Structures are given as C-alpha cells and as structure tokens.
C-alpha cells in the first residue's frame, strides 16, 4: 500500500503537475472516457448518461476503459459537470444530442433556493467509485473534475446550451448582487464536490470552465475570476494539483493562472509556446487540435513533436488535446499518439 | 455628382479606413441589415433568404433599413457569403435555423467541377442593387462583402455548419493539392464577386472568415493565409479599403493583417488595446460584445467609452460589435449606441 502510494506520487503525471523532472511527458485526453470508445457504448447501452454517472461499478468501468486501451498516464473520473447539481436536487437532465437542459431557468433570487450546499452524503456513488478506482488503478493517478461557476451558471440561466450566453451576461450586468450570490453558491458546490473526490482518493482535480471563453477579459475578471479563485484556493488546501481549462481562453490564460491553477490547460488555438509566455512559471497542458486526429499520421506526428518541443519551455508539460476527444475519433489513433508522446519525450 | 463623390470620399467611415482624422468615430454593425429589425421581417415575410438576396429592390430596401433607423456611418449590402456559390450553380440553400446546407459535399477532385469562375453576368441583381443603393445613399459609404475561402470551404466540405470542422481539416491535411485547388477556386470567386461590388459602386469591402478561428495559427498560415492574401491583393488594385474579420481570431490577427487588410476586425474576446498591439499600423474595427446590448445602459455606455478610448491608440478606429447583431437585440439600444459613439468621439 505504501509502495503503491509512493509510486503513485512518483508517477509522470503528478511529477509533471509539480514541475519536477519526468521520465517521459505524461499524456491523457479530455473526454477519453466515453463516446469515442465502442466498449463505452456497449456498457452504456440504454442507460441515460446521468444514471450511468450514479452507478459506481459503471463509473469505474468507463473510467478504466481508456486507461486499458490507450495506456494514458492518468484516468479521469467518468462524470459530468452537472452531476453535483443533480445530486442536490436541481431539476435537469442531459438530453442526447443537445446537452444539459434545466427545467426552470434561473431568473430571480427565489430561483437560487434549490442551490443548497453539497455534502458527501449527496454523492455516495462518487465516493464509492473513486475508492474502487484508486485501488484498481494503483500507481496511475485519478483526476476528478468539476464545472466552474460561470459555465454552470450559463446552463442554469439559459436553461440549456447557448451560443451567445446572452441571458447569462444580461443577468451578470443587470443584477451583480444576484449574480455573485449565484456564482458563490456554485463555487461552494464545486469546491465541496472536488473535496469529496480528493478525500476519496483522487490525485488531482481539473476545473472546467467550458464557456469562460465567451467573455471579454474585463467581464471575466470582475464577475467570474473571484469565484473560480475561491474554489481553487479551497482545493489548494487539499494538497493536490489543480488544473484549470476552458476553450477560447487565449486572452484569459493569465487570469486563469492567477485564479490559483497549478496547471493551465491550453486550447489548440494558442500555440503552446505563446501560452507558456502568458503563464510564466506555470505547468501547461495541451494542446493538439482534436480534429487533427483525422489527418494522416505523419501530420499528427509532426504536430505532436512540435508541441512536445514547445512544452519543454514550461516548468512542466502534460500532453493532451486542446479540447475533448471528438465522438468520431478512431481510438487506434489515440493509442498510437500515446505511444508517440511516450517514446519521443523519453528519447530527448 | 462630383460633390456627392467628394463628400462620400470624405465620410467619417472612409477617412477612418484610411487612418485619416475624423470628425467622429464612425460606427456600423455587422448584421445590421436583417434579423433584429421588425421592418426586415415585414419585407422578407415568406421569401426565402437566397431569393431575397437575388431581388435588387428587396436587397436595396433591406440594406437601407438600418441606415434609416440607426444613422450608422456605413451601409452593408444585404447578402450572404454563399450568394456567389449559388450564382455559379452550386446546389445549396440556407435552411432557417440551420444555416447553409450543401446538397453534395466536396470529397474528391471531381466535386470541384461546379466551382467555375464567377462573372458579373452571374450576379446581375447584385450590380443592379449596388448601383441603386449608391445613388440613394449619396455620401454614406456602401460596404460589400464576401466569404473567405476557408469559411466557404468548410460549408462545402462539411455539407453545412459544423462545430469541429473535422472533415474540412482532414481534407486539408490529407490532400493539400486538392485543398489548394479548392481554396484557389474559392479565392477567385470571392475576388471576382468583390470586384463586381466595387465596380458597381461599393466604397469598401469586408472579407469574412467566420470560421478561421477554428484553426491553429500554423495551419491557418500554411493552408488559408495564401488564399485570403490572393483575394485581398487583387481587391487592393481596385483602390477601396479592405476589412478582414473572423471570430475567435485573437491568435490570428497578425496574420490576417499581413494577408493584406487595411482594417482588421476584432472579436470582443480580445481587448481592443491588445489587438492594436498585435496589428501595428493597422486600422481596427470593433469590438463590443454583441450580448452586452442586453445589459443596463450604463454598462453599455461604460464599455463603449472604454473601447473608444482604446481605439485612439490605432491609426484609425471604426466602432462595431465584436460579432454580428444577435436576433433578439432591441433596435432602440443600437440607435442609442450610435448616438453615444458619435457624441462621445466628437467631444474628445
């Protein structure tokens, strides 16, 4: 047990998160657990997403599938950013082909009432799945994740996915008091959820602010940053690395770093070396264009090598895609990509 | 006639495009002609979009509506980026709520055959509408626009709107020869269309690369930039200012400028002063978050003043939103915004 703990702690992924020398550049993929894998569709068959997220044995199996298949350096718990909201009783569902849909969008202060604090007892299946996984994974780290307050607020205010986030931004500016109460509650829920994950054994956390990139930096800084910072600070006391990521966040990278990230995830739109200059002293994660997996292998390999080269300019680099694995991705390409990252980075 | 020509040439918009001193900061809005205006829905009632684009009297009326209502400093011809493709016989339509849908997506070299050069005779309704408009508008400049090759290619390859542009990027990398032939043809079509517009009397052109921001800068530079550059160079010989714009292009601004833009349009995600540093010597256009029009007036006014202040650091600044007018926008807010831009910028 102690031996396993120590080899876990010494894993390439956790060493890279801490900016320590690594035997090879660690690699994992956002959305590695799920839709691109036939074995995922086989076990999920007929089971709605949120139900799957609440069955510990299924969560464990789906989380392990990409570790077995790809040989990635970290597992990420199969879940969804709305799981904590569902757990405290918010009336929402994940509609296939649409995304999270909320029954009663937030418009007034009274609509905040269902957003009560989350406790470990609300998500026993998460604790159980994480414990089982940590035991099975041994030296392979498990990443837990949560949705950041702005992204969760966007779903709650819009009632579902939105292209322009107009209602969310309107509320933010029209009633900053209500807005800050909303985001404060969501920050508390996210922090509590991440605490559950870490206390059950997760070795690192990723805070996903999927929609942060819809904001101009001044609005992000005034209305979002303080709440994401509160989460990252609270999680910092748990002693695990904190990764922070969103797409279209090229202009926000400095702020996302200063919110308290140990590792800043980088969208493929920002060349990694440019991103590194924007977050001096931080470890970076990324950033191959997820659509590049459909290119010929030589192209993928060239881009991967360039990203690995750029990554050496940071205190640490975790290879990843610049966004989640696309559903139509050929898993064999990802297997080959993991091998390439390992061999190329071990060689130099 | 000479007097009108000279006052047109001396308009705030054209002076700003050339980086000359202006009596006030000129302002217009992307998608000002269209969906946010009740008078637009009234005249379009029952008429499909592409049919509306081919009726000169309707094009003229819809183009004039926002000039009358908002008092903007420039008109933009009511059209769509797929109009030139439709005009040469590509089988496509604009499906309400979806966007452009192409009957036979491009997969092989033979699929390029329909992409023949465009001639003025293919778009007589455009020439007629522009001539009529220029005469009616007098000293108010008319902007003509075209879709840039990458964005057009994306629709043609994907068969419609796409979130990940996976097929487009796959073709780009798998068959660069076919890709460059495709983009070369699209560049020729776009350049020819802009030439028709300018020869009929348009005073400026905007090249929209709506989806360019889906590309990492190295791919943009290798596979897209040369084709956009070819268009902008050809149009440069016509003696009118060239505006170049796309969303999510923060990392591409320098390349879009070097492709030959006189004016670089800026997404709201990039603070205007930051954008100005990325395109030294260029005039900038933008960049209020289009969702900000739903905020309280004080917030809109504050942001607008900040943008005007930042814009003074560039050789010229044309105020605009950072993307198109959202359909649910209250037109009265835009009227007030035009007044504010004019009075604030005239004062200082």
Image (tube, coloured by chain):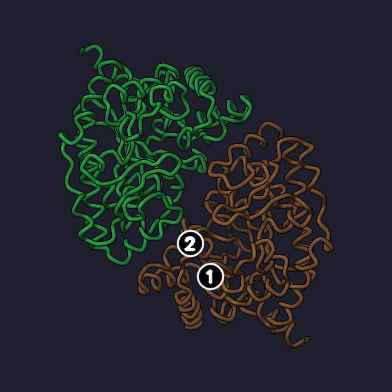
Chain colours: A green, B brown
Q: In this view, does B336 lie above or below A344?
A: below
Both on one chain, marks 2 and 1?
Answer: yes
Mark closer to the chain start, 2 or 1: 2
Q: Closer to the camera, A100 or A334?
A: A100
Q: Residue at x 21, y 49 (%)?
A: A115
Q: Mark 2 lies on which chain?
A: B
Tag 2's secondary structure? Answer: helix
The image quarter containing residue A216 is bottom left
The image quarter containing residue A231 is top left
Q: Closer to the camera, A80 or A202?
A: A80
Q: In this view, does A230 lie above or below B178?
A: below
Q: Is residue B142 above or below residue A87?
A: below
Separation (CA) of disc 2 from disc 1: 13 Å
Query: Could you say which disc has been placed on residue B273 in the image?
Result: 2
Q: Name the residue under label 1.
A: B319
Where residue B322 appears, as percent x and y from the top left, is: 51, 62
Q: Closer to the camera, B88 or A165?
A: B88
Tag 1's secondary structure? Answer: strand
Q: Residue at x 43, y 47 (%)?
A: A249
Q: Which chain carries label 1?
A: B
Query: Could you say which disc has been placed on residue B16 in the image?
Result: none
In the rendered structure, the answer to whether residue B45 lies left or right of residue A161 reads right
The residue mark sitting in front, 2 or 1, is: 1
Q: Closer to the camera, B185 or B262?
A: B185
Where residue B303 appears, as percent x and y from the top left, is: 41, 68
The answer, for residue A232, to whether it is visible in the render is no
**Mark 1 surroundings: few (<14), some (14-19) or many (≥20) residues within 10 A:** many
Q: Which residue is drawn at 62% across and 37% down?
A: B167
């Amino acid at each position: 047990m102690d031996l396993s703990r120590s080899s876990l702690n010494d894993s390439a992924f956790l060493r890279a998160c801490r900016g320590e020398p690594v035997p090879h550049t660690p690699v994992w993929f956002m959305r590695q657990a799920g839709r691109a894998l036939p074995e995922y569709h086989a076990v999920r068959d007929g089971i709605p997403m949120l139900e799957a997220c609440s069955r510990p044995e299924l969560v464990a199996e789906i989380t392990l599938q990409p570790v077995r298949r790809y040989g990635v350096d970290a597992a990420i718990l199969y879940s969804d950013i709305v799981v904590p909201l569902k757990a405290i009783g918010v009336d929402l569902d994940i509609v296939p082909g649409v995304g999270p849909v909320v029954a009663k969008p937030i418009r007034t202060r009274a609509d905040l009432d269902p957003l009560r604090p989350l406790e470990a007892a609300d998500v026993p299946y998460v604790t159980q799945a994480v414990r089982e996984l940590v035991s099975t994974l041994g030296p392979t780290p498990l990443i837990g994740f949560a949705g950041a307050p702005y992204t969760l607020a966007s779903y709650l205010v819009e009632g579902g996915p939105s292209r322009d986030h107009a209602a969310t931004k309107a509320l933010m500016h029209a009633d900053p008091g209500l807005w800050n109460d909303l985001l404060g509650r969501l920050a508390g829920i996210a922090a509590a959820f991440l605490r559950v994950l870490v206390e059950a054994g997760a070795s690192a956390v990723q805070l996903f602010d999927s929609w942060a990139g819809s904001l101009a930096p001044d609005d992000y800084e005034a209305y979002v940053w303080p709440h994401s910072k509160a989460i990252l600070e609270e999680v910092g006391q748990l002693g695990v690395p904190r990764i922070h990521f969103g797409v279209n966040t090229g202009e926000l990278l400095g702020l996302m770093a200063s919110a308290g990230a140990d590792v800043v995830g980088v969208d493929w739109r920002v060349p990694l070396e440019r991103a590194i200059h924007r977050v001096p002293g931080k470890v970076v994660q990324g950033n191959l264009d997820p659509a590049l997996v459909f290119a010929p292998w030589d192209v993928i390999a060239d881009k991967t090598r360039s990203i690995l080269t750029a990554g050496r300019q940071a205190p640490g680099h975790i290879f990843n895609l610049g966004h989640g694995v696309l559903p139509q991705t050929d898993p064999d390409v990802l297997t080959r990509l993991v091998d390439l990252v390992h061999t190329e980075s071990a060689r130099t």
